Amino acid sequence: MATLIKNGRLVTPHGVKEEDLLIEGGVIAALGHIVPSEGDQIFDAKGKYVLPGGIETHTHLDLEVMGMHTADDFFTGSRAALLGGTTTFLDFATQFRGETMSEGFENWDKKASVGSFTDYGYHMALTEWNELLSAEMPDMVKAGVTSFKLYQAYKGALMVDDAELFLALQRAAELGVAIGVHCENGDVIDLLVQQAKAKDEKAPEYHEKVRPAVLEAEAIWRFITLATLAGANHYVVHLSTKDGLELIRRKREEGATTVIETCPQYLFLDKSKYDADGFYEKAGFVMSPPLREKEDQEALWQGLSTGDIQLVGTDHCSFNLKGQKDHGKDGFWNIPNGAPGIELRMNLLYSGGVATGKFDIERFAELTSTNAAKYFGLYPKKGCLEEGSDADIAILDPEVTWSVTHDQLHDNCDYTPYEGITLQGKISDVFLRGQHLVEDGKLTSEKPQGQFLKRDLPA
Ligand code: URP
Ligand code: ZN
């Protein structure tokens, strides 16, 4: 049976068109002015945007940190993603120290076996570098994992040193895979944490003070220098600062090909959140990098408008305030880092970007879907409204004005950092490979139908 989406504003790679879109066999069969055939299911999208389903580039589902698992697993995290217009996400499968990449991959497949409501793929996060891992990298490529992440932060846990990072970048250059890096100077942060402990500075706000913006910029500079020397395809994950953005622009002028991802939290929230009274009011914003200044937000919005920043992921890494974040009541260093956001990514970016006139709906589609599909080897199967592409479609009603409250969301976390924010525009309906899985904001099936995506090499 075919589905015909009528009268919508289709956001295609060739412009915005007031046309119809026909879905058959899970793919987009035709675009244009289409006369319905008998038996076609008609969806009237009049006045709404018809967008390529969102591609979320940065999640941590069912991740173990400090002996605790994130509040969201694949089931609850992907359910929230789908309801927010995301039809594909890329999670960080992790090779913990002493493990092989294959073990990391298998562990993540077990986590994913609870079912996903959206399609999904993995990046492989590496916590060390050695000959064994180097030899294994081609196996990951064969398995469809074509991007890898390393950390310059989290000393003693996830952090690699410059030599490890450089060797990984050289290997990535040989194989054509992408390396994403969490850029913060972990050595200096570790020292600042020790100094804060010695001064009895325990409250959540000190998390921000030991992770100053300049330590992100310094790490970015080092990472791009090493990646360029190695000739590797590389990107900066969750960029949070104006300084970092300016450095990347300078590096690009010298020939660097750096791709940038930022996150909604660095666009909508600022460090004044750490001035609140009470532990719980602040601990929900303990994430790395931390929230920054308003001028950083403005610079990042501008970077999205100009196209200098290409990707928007949420770094969805949810920990409950009660029972998880409060592990750090006696010292901020024990608060698990991260915050939820997966469900709001598309709505936040539309409201803050398109509804305010910062960029147009075509740039929105690029930032939420197309650029990620291209960069992470999913295009044109995903990321565009084109004949032959998967019918992954998000319908957005631009007329709705609403306020975010935690009780409207569908993840498994006990708060949202965006509580009370008023948004213009809302995702109303979502199709995954042609199936109408979200109808007027509600799930039509409680059965997860997402598939694992084997990805090509990055563009
Ligand atoms: O605070 C965060 N972002 N936690 C998740 C791990 C990471 O740094 O990406
Ligand atoms: Zn990170």
Image (spheres, rainbow, N blue to C red):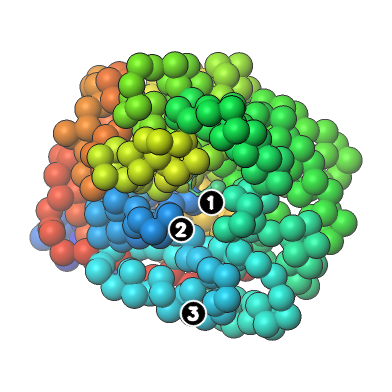
Q: Secondary structure at mark 3?
A: helix
Q: Residue flagged by tag 3: what amino acid is it?
A: Glu
Residue 353 pos. (x, y %): 47, 25
Q: Earlier in the sequence, mark 3 or mark 2?
A: 2
Left or right, 68 with reference to 140? left
Q: Are marks 3 and 1 in contact (CB under 8 Å)?
A: no
Is residue 12 visible in the rendered image? The answer is: no
| Label 2 neighbour load within 10 Å: few <14, some 14-19, many 20+ | many
Left or right, 236 with reference to 281? right
Numbered mark located on residue 12 in the image: none
Q: Are marks 1 and 2 in contact (CB under 8 Å)?
A: yes
Q: Earlier in the sequence, mark 3 or mark 1?
A: 3
| Residue at image location 53% in from the left, 28% down from the top | 200
* Residue at the spot of label 1: 372
| Residue at image location 53% in from the left, 32% down from the top | 207
Q: Residue flagged by tag 2: what amino acid is it?
A: Leu
Q: Nearer the viewer, residue 205 or 341?
A: 205
| Residue at image location 68% in from the left, 40% down from the top | 191
* Residue at the spot of label 2: 90
Label 3 or label 1, whichever lies nearer to me, is 3
Q: Secondary structure at mark 2?
A: strand
| Label 3 neighbour load within 10 Å: few <14, some 14-19, many 20+ | some
| Label 1 neighbour load within 10 Å: few <14, some 14-19, many 20+ | many
In which quadrant is the N terminus drawn?
Answer: bottom left
Residue 298 pos. (x, y %): 58, 19
Residue 173 pos. (x, y %): 77, 67
* Residue at the spot of label 3: 103
Is residue 412 visible in the rendered image? The answer is: yes
Q: CA distance from mark 1 to mark 2?
A: 10 Å
Q: Nearer the viewer, residue 417 or 352?
A: 417
Query: For the residue with label 3, is its CB less than 8 Å from the closest atom of ligand 1?
Result: no
